[in-house]
Amino acid sequence: MSVFKEPVVIHKGLDNVYVKESKICFIDGEASKLFYRGYSIQDLATHSTFEETAFLLIYGWLPTRNQLAEFTERIESYRTLDPPILQLIRSFPLKSDPMDVLRTAVSALGLYDAQPLTDDAEARIDKGIRILAKAPTIIASFDRIRSGKEPLQPKSGLQHAAGFLYMLSGKEPDPYDAHVMDVALILHAEHEMNASTFACTVTASTLADMYSIITSGVGTLRGPLHGGANEAALRTVMDVGDPTKAEDYVTEALAQKKRIMGFGHRVYKTWDPRYLILKNLGGELAARKGQEKLFDTALAIETSAMKHLEGSPIFPNVDSYSGVVFHMLEIPTDLFTPIFVMSRISGWIAHAIEYLQANRLIRPKALYTGKTGLSYIPFDSRVGTLEG
Ligand SMILES: CC(C)(COP(=O)(O)OP(=O)(O)OC[C@H]1O[C@@H](n2cnc3c(N)ncnc32)[C@H](O)[C@@H]1OP(=O)(O)O)[C@@H](O)C(=O)NCCC(=O)NCCS
């Protein structure tokens, strides 16, 4: 029983708790709408690039041509890893999960910051951009090292998406592949106060440095309830293996109360607008790559699930096609969540900076339901359980 007399409301999962006002991202989960700084995700996916979208999220406005060129050059100039960081990545067990590698390497970057103590907004943004720029190099370097290949230096002139695909494969990507990757990064760049963004915000509220803030985000995105659903969705599509088997799979899964991966969302109670964008790109990509069977299986699962879930608020989310798309881009499955990080760092930076403009240490409460006033028990009288 609680020792507190006043009525206390516990907001389990912090559902519907607002922690700040924000001008960064708006999701209308009933109307299938998503806006970054007021611009619709469809417009950004059609007209923007990841670099431009990251600028928009971090600074709040669409950059001029010169601002974008300066921002792009800045990212490019920060891409290379310092030798000790590369050495550190080489020292990790080859079987490490790439998310663990990324989390550790992002944290280690802070040790090599030339001005670790500067913490005004511009210095924080710059540190954030350094981490953003280096994330693809960290991920690609580890992937090559674990496959027995030498990591590659970032290639000048290639942007975040194309540069990452190049550092993974050693080949300059086909322009359409680079475009699909770029759009996927735009779609994952920001999504309001999700768990990892909240983790970054909590860390920012203590006035910790940007490396600690982003490391908190990576650690939180690591969990299967947050990042990771796209891997599971791809696995489902591959296990089903053929469009003709989709109906049996869905019927059986739902009968057993299993969740269809890539469906349902805490905020969207209708189509996730990002899903449709990726589905359209995925269809074209499948035709170019001769991967129609994989894509048609994903489509058949969707058609069947929509038939069975009709009338419920469960619709396809971004993950129903992102895993399939990344797979068609020949990206190893365990890199899907690190790619999410590679993009989401831009949203994390934006939220940390925004929160710090009107900072208040985040310190919620826990309702104590334990005992008080117990007498200390000498060793010989203890039973070694909760009972005594
Ligand atoms: C994302 C998710 C956790 C959101 O869940 P939520 O809004 O909190 O909804 P709940 O977990 O409370 O589920 C509500 C009901 O819908 C059902 N449901 C939710 N997602 C479902 C899915 N993907 N397939 C089948 N049924 C689903 C639940 O089983 C539950 O049914 P019940 O009331 O009979 O028990 C959930 O939809 C899910 O697990 N989806 C699959 C994983 C996924 O794609 N995640 C990526 C999100 S971007």
Image: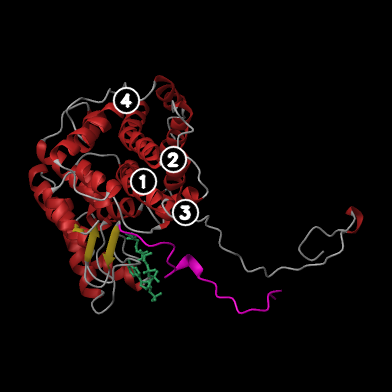
Circle on res. 210: 2
Chief SS of the magenta region: loop
Provide the residue span drawn in magenta.
Answer: 1-23
Disc 1 designates what residue? 349
Q: Nearer the viewer, mark 2 or mark 3?
A: 3
Q: Quadrant of residue 5?
A: bottom right
Ligand 1 is within 8 Å of the C-beta of the residue at disc 1: no
Q: Is 99 positioned to the left or the right of 49 in the image?
A: right
Q: Nearer the viewer, mark 3 or mark 4?
A: 3
The location of residue 78, given as percent across then percent down, is 31, 28
Disc 3 designates what residue? 359
The location of residue 39, given as percent across then percent down, is 19, 57
Q: Amino acid at mark 2?
A: Met
Mark 2, other Cα within 10 Å: few <14 / some 14–19 / many ≥20: many
Among numbered discs 1 and 3, the one appearing first in the sequence: 1
Among numbered discs 2 and 4, the one appearing first in the sequence: 4
Q: Nearer the viewer, mark 1 or mark 3?
A: 3
Q: Nearer the viewer, mark 4 or mark 1?
A: 1
- Above or below for 153 versus 203: above
Q: Amino acid at mark 3?
A: Asn
Among numbered discs 4 and 1, the one appearing first in the sequence: 4
Q: Nearer the viewer, residue 44 or 254?
A: 44
Look at the numbered discs 1 and 2 and tell me whether their residues touch, using CB distance below 8 Å: yes
- Distance (Cα) linking label 2 and label 4: 19 Å
Among numbered discs 1 and 2, the one appearing first in the sequence: 2
